Image (cartoon, rainbow, N blue to C red):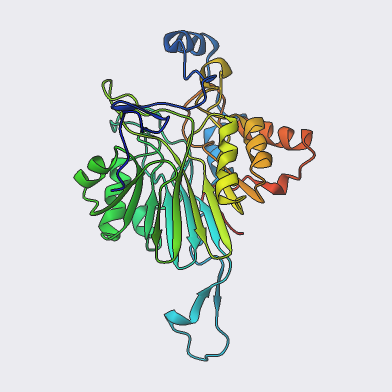
Amino acid sequence: MHDSPRGGADAPDHHLGPRFVNTDPSVRIGGDFWRWQRERRAAGLPRPPADGYDAFARRWRVAPDFGYGLRVRLDSSDVEANDIQPARPVVWWLGHATVLLRIGELHVITDPHLGGRASPLSFIGPARRVPAPARADELPRIDVALISHNHYDHLDTRSIRHLLARNPHMTCCAPLGLGAWLRRRGVSDVQELDWWQRIEHDGVEVHCVPAQHWSSRTLFDRNRTLWCGWVVRAPGASFYFAGDTGYTPRLAEVAARLGPPDLAALPIGAYAPRWFMRGQHVDPPEAVRIHEELLIRQSLAIHWGTFELADDSLDEPPAVLRAALAERGLSEETFWLLRQGEARCW
C-alpha cells in the first residue's frame, strides 16, 4: 500500500479527516434524489431504445476476437506460441466501464463488470440490457485490474472472484480505502494508491489520477474510499481511463503532468437530468471538451448502452456525441463508438 496522510495540516486537499472530497469548490454532487425519482417516474424515464431492447443488444454487441492485433512471425515454418507477437496496442470495449487493454506485454482490465446486475443483490437493481460479450474464463490472461471506485456498476464482487479464479496472481490497483475490500475477496496483490501516486509493473507505469465523483456501497460509508482515474504508460503508448467523473477544469492536469494520452476511455452516458447528474457524470459535449482540453489523440466512448442508471435512454448518448463532435468540427473517427466486444488497434 502507498501511504498518504489522512487529515492534518499536510493532508492533500481531497482528504477531509476519514473522508474524501472533490477539489472543485464550484461543484455540487447530486441534489434532491427523491425529486429526481418522482420526476422520472412521472415522465416514464428512461425510455426504451427506439427499436427495442433486443434489437439494440443485437446491434451493439459482437463476439470478441482476443487474438485481434497479433501478428505471426514469418521466419518460422513451425509457428509456436512465442512466434505470435503483439503488433500495436489493442483495446476491447466489454460494456459499461469495462475496457480490456493489451499494452506492452500486459493485459489490463478496467472496472471489470461482466455480471447481470449493477447491484448488491441478484434479483433487483439495474439489469444489464446488453449481455456481456465474454465470460471471465474466456478472457486472455489478466495481469492488472484497475478499479476506479466502489459503486456497484464499477466494482462487481462476482466478476472480481471469477477473474481471480483464472488469474490468482492478478494485481489489483485501487484508490485509497479499497484495499481491505479486495483482500477479503481473495486478491493477494493489492496496490492501493492516492491521486498522483504510481507503481511500475513489468516496465509499464500505472498512475492514479484525480476524478470528480463520490463513493458508497452502503448507507453508512459515503466517501470513505477514494475515487480516481488511471493512466497507463508503456514505451510509445499511453492510455487514460477516466472512470466516473463530472467535468472540472482540473482534469486537464492529467495531461499537463503525464502528457496527452494516445487513447482515452471517456464516459458519455448516465448524464440526465443535468441538474442532478452534472457534478458526477459528464455528458457527451463535456466528454468532447475533455478530449480537446487534454489533447487526446483518440478517444473511446464508455459508460453507456449497458445499464439504465439515469434518465437518458440507452441509444441516446451516441446521437448526442455525434452532434457534439460535429459542432466542434471533429471527425466521428476521433471518438470511437465501439460495439460491446469490438476491438481496435491504436
Quadrant in which residue 343 is drawn: bottom right
Q: Nearer the viewer, residue 259 or 163?
A: 259
Q: Position of residue 139 (x, y in %)?
A: 40, 59
119 sits to left or right of 332: left
| For residue 133, above or below residue 22 | below
Q: Position of residue 85 (x, y in %)?
A: 51, 76
**Which residue shows up at 36% across the image and 33% down it?**
10
Question: What's the residue at 38%, 52% (across, down)?
Answer: 145
Q: How many numbered marks appear?
A: 0
Name the one closer to the observer, 198 or 108: 198
Q: Classify residue 113 by image quadrant.
A: top left
Residue at image location 51% in from the left, 20% down from the top:
25
Decide if residue 68 is on the left or right side of residue 184: right
Left or right relative to 29: residue 1: left
Which quadrant, please, contains the C terminus?
Answer: bottom right
Toward which corner of the image does residue 271 lie, by quadrant?
top right
Q: Is residue 55 visible?
A: no
For residue 14, above or below residue 196: above
- Name the residue at 40% across, 33% down: 12
Residue ranking furthest to the front: 9
Q: Position of residue 301 (x, y in %)?
A: 59, 42
**Is residue 302 in sight in this rendering?**
yes
Residue farthest to the right?
A: 329
Give the camera-side residue of 129 and 325. Answer: 325
Measured as percent of width and height from the top left, residue 217 is found at: 30, 29
